[in-house]
Amino acid sequence: MELISGVKVRKLRLIPDERGWLMELLRSDWEEFEKFGQAYVTTCYPGVIKAWHYHKLQTDHFTGVSGLAKVVLYDNRKKSPTKGKVNEFYLGTLNPILVKIPNGVYHGFTAVGTELAMIVNFPTRTYNYEKPDEYRLPYDDPSIPYKWGVKMG
C-alpha cells in the first residue's frame, strides 16, 4: 500500500517473558517522534464508528493496546502529492504497530470483532478545551471515498 504523504508506520516489538510482556509504544529517538504534547487513551465499542476529523496543528501517533481497531486515513490536503488517497490499518494486540498521522489528514477508527478497541495516542500538542484543534465531518460524509463496514467475500 502506498502511504499517504507524511504517514509513517512502525512495527512494534512485544517482548514477552514468564512474568508477562513489555512493548515500547513511542520513543524520542525514533524517526516518527516530533515532540510530546500529551498521552491519552481512546476506546471504541463494537459497531461504533468514530470518524471523521483532522487537526490543523497537531500530529497524532496511534497505537492499539487492546482489541483490534481498523484505523482509516484520508488525505484531503490541497497541496499533498497523495491528495485523495485512503489508507487502512489494523492495529491492536494482533498487530502491534504505531501509525503517525500528520496534521491535515482526516482519520477515524472502529472496533473490529466483538471486543472493545483501545488506542493510545501521543499527540504533539495538548488539548485546548476552549479552542479544540479538531475539524469534523460525519462518518458517512460523501466527500470521503470510504465505506465503513466489514468487507465480505
Image (cartoon, rainbow, N blue to C red):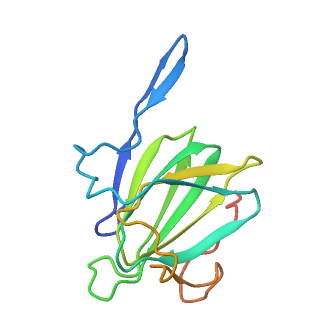
16 lies above or below 8 = above
Quadrant where the image shows the C terminus: bottom right
Tell me where residue 125 sits by quadrant. bottom left
Task: Please state the horizontal and vertical placement of residue 82, each as a whole percent of the image.
Answer: 32, 76
Residue found farthest to the top = 18
Residue found 42% across the figure and 77% down from its top: 55
Q: Which residue appears farthest toward the front when viewing the image?
A: 130
Give how far across and how far down residue 84 sits, in percent: 41, 81
Q: Could you tell me residue 102's position as x and y percent?
A: 34, 68
Q: Residue at the spot x=73%, y=65% of the render?
A: 48
User: Image quadrant of residue 8?
Assistant: bottom left
Query: Does 42 sit above or below residue 76?
Result: above
Task: Give the left or right position of residue 150, taking residue 122 as reference.
Answer: right
Q: Quadrant of the N terminus?
A: bottom left
Q: Quadrant of residue 138?
A: bottom right
Q: How many marks?
A: 0
Left or right placement of residue 125 versus residue 111 in this view? left
Residue 128, given in percent of the width and then of the height, sits at 46, 75
Residue at 41% of width from left, 41% of height from top?
Answer: 25
Q: Residue at x 58, y 85 (%)?
A: 137
In the rendered image, the vertical position of residue 33 relative to residue 136, given as above or below: above
Q: In the rendered view, does 41 fall on the left or right side of 44?
A: left
